[in-house]
Image: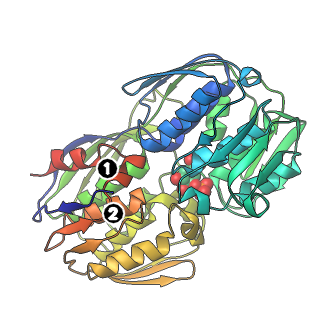
């Protein structure tokens, strides 16, 4: 664990950043490439710790995967040809790897054991293992399948009609991936629309999937064929620079390659509501996902209310939105966001504790937080809780603090954005 002193002395920011690959899409590109028959090529892959955990799991399952920079090649004979791993599959810090792998492995023909790091070992898995068991999956884990390590004995699954109790793309995706290898038609009903990368990628790999508002139908037994995937940049990574551009005085940033899938663009709605000054230019799509360029400059901001259907569209951006709100005039209320308590760390507590240390006027609530702005932030020693997004929030805060900020663990940022500090340095004027 390496601490890092961030002493940027109140710079302004100017320049262009090409946003690195989307974490959710990168994971799925490997998973789908491994399930499919044939060769899959991936361009723009995010080489972060989390996505490398996914690659490592599939290599242990005998899938041939080679990486060259941001290009990945996957050669697979399909899910029925995987080898039974003779080692435990280690999913690191990645909730997406852990939960989606459970869905995939449940309907495979191999037996395996999954384990993650300290944070993963505390994150709830019954949201996935319960519906999978209803599909006939054979899973054993601590506290009746709530926590890893979890052992999976691949078996023939049954389709399910499942109404999701939480808005979660990880749960939805685990069920859909299991449904591919189940008898009959699976129906998943969401309470709010969560990111739809799995549905989009199923289609891209040749599956028939029907999406009608919040209801998704997928017939089991469909074969996927290897294909070419272009990964857009991660709007959740862009978010840190969108906020930096909006709050660091006299700044102007251009962010290229940004994924603009509408199930992910909640932060743009918030920036708009707060009066931020930005433009979005959609690029001609070279990917199965929307992408484009965003230009943003600093401007006066006002508080806003964030809740309801917006929450799943910006769930990972809430830490950095909280920092944004400390610089807006008036009150910002974030509600219906109790899911933050079961992320890499409890992000309600982490955000509130750490921003308070810098002098923010912020209060935790049962399902979110309330922030009164604007406040001048001073320096301090902040904790990341080993959570990449808390680390990056602290680093962006340090761009406007009157004194330096020290973070206890800079290494955790590599989970989603290994080149984050290089990208900051490249736009400091
Ligand atoms: C993800 C879904 C979200 C998000 C996570 C990635 C995905 O989690 O927070 O970073 O790739 O499906 P939930 O589905 O648990 O909300």
Q: Quadrant of residue 46?
A: top left
Which residue does the image show at 26% across and 80% down from the upper left? Answer: 374
Q: Which mark is residue 38?
A: none
Q: Is residue 91 above or below residue 127?
A: above
The residue at label 1 has a CB less than 8 Å from ligand 1:
no
Which residue does the image show at 53% across and 59% down from the upper left? Answer: 118
For marks 2 and 1, the one nearer the N-term is 1
The residue indicated by pointer 1 is 279
Residue 27 lies left or right of residue 179; in this view the side is left
Label 2 – label 1 distance at C-alpha? 23 Å
Q: Can residue 373 be spotted in the picture?
A: no
Residue 364 lies left or right of residue 8; in this view the side is right
Q: Which mark is residue 393?
A: 2
Q: Can residue 228 be spotted in the picture?
A: yes
Q: Residues within 10 Å of mark 1 (few under 14, many from 20)?
A: few
Which residue does the image show at 38% across and 63% down from the upper left? Answer: 390
Q: Quadrant of residue 130?
A: bottom right
Image coords of residue 343 (percent x, y): 54, 62
Residue 387 lies left or right of residue 302; in this view the side is right
Instruction: Find numbered disc 2 in the image and state the secondary structure of the residue it sits on.
Output: helix
Which of discs 2 and 1 lies nearer the camera? The answer is 2
């Amino acid at each position: 664990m390496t601490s890092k002193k961030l002493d940027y002395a109140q710079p302004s920011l100017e320049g262009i950043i090409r946003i690195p690959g989307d974490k959710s899409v990168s994971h799925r590109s490997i998973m789908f490439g491994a399930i499919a028959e044939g060769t899959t090529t991936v361009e723009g892959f995010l080489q972060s710790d989390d996505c490398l955990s996914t690659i490592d799991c599939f290599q242990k399952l005998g899938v041939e995967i080679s990486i060259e920079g941001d290009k990945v090649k996957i050669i697979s004979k399909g899910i029925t040809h995987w080898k039974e791993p003779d080692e435990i599959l280690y999913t690191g810090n990645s909730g997406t790897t852990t939960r989606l792998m459970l869905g995939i492995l449940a309907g495979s023909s191999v037996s395996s054991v999954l384990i993650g790091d300290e944070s993963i070992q505390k994150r709830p898995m019954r949201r996935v293992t319960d519906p999978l068991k209803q599909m006939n999956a054979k899973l054993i884990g601590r506290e009746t399948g709530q926590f890893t390590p979890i052992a999976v004995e691949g078996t023939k699954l049954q389709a399910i009609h499942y109404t999701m109790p939480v808005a979660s793309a990880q749960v939805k995706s685990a069920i859909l991936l299991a449904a591919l290898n189940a008898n009959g038609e699976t129906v998943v009903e969401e309470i709010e629309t969560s990111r739809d990368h799995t549905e989009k990628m199923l289609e891209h790999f040749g599956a028939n999937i029907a999406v009608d508002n919040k209801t998704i139908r997928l017939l089991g037994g469909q074969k996927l064929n290897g294909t070419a995937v272009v990964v857009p940049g991660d709007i959740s990574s862009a978010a840190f620079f969108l906020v930096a551009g909006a709050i660091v005085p006299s700044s102007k940033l251009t962010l290229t390659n940004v994924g603009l899938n509408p199930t992910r663009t909640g932060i743009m709605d918030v920036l708009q509501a707060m009066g931020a000054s930005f433009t979005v230019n959609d690029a001609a799509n070279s990917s199965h996902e929307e992408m484009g360029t965003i230009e943003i400059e600093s401007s006066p901001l006002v508080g806003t209310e964030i809740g309801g259907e917006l929450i799943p569209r910006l769930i990972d951006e809430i830490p950095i939105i909280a920092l944004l709100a400390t610089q807006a005039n008036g009150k910002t209320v974030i509600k219906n966001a109790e899911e933050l308590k079961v992320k890499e760390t409890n992000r309600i507590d982490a955000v509130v504790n750490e921003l308070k240390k810098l002098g923010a006027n912020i209060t935790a609530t049962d399902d979110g937080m309330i922030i009164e702005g604007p406040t001048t932030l001073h320096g301090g020693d902040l904790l990341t809780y080993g959570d990449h997004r808390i680390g990056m929030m602290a680093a962006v805060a340090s761009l406007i603090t009157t004194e330096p900020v020290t973070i206890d663990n800079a290494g955790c940022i590599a989970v989603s954005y290994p080149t984050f500090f290089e990208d900051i340095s490249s736009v400091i004027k």
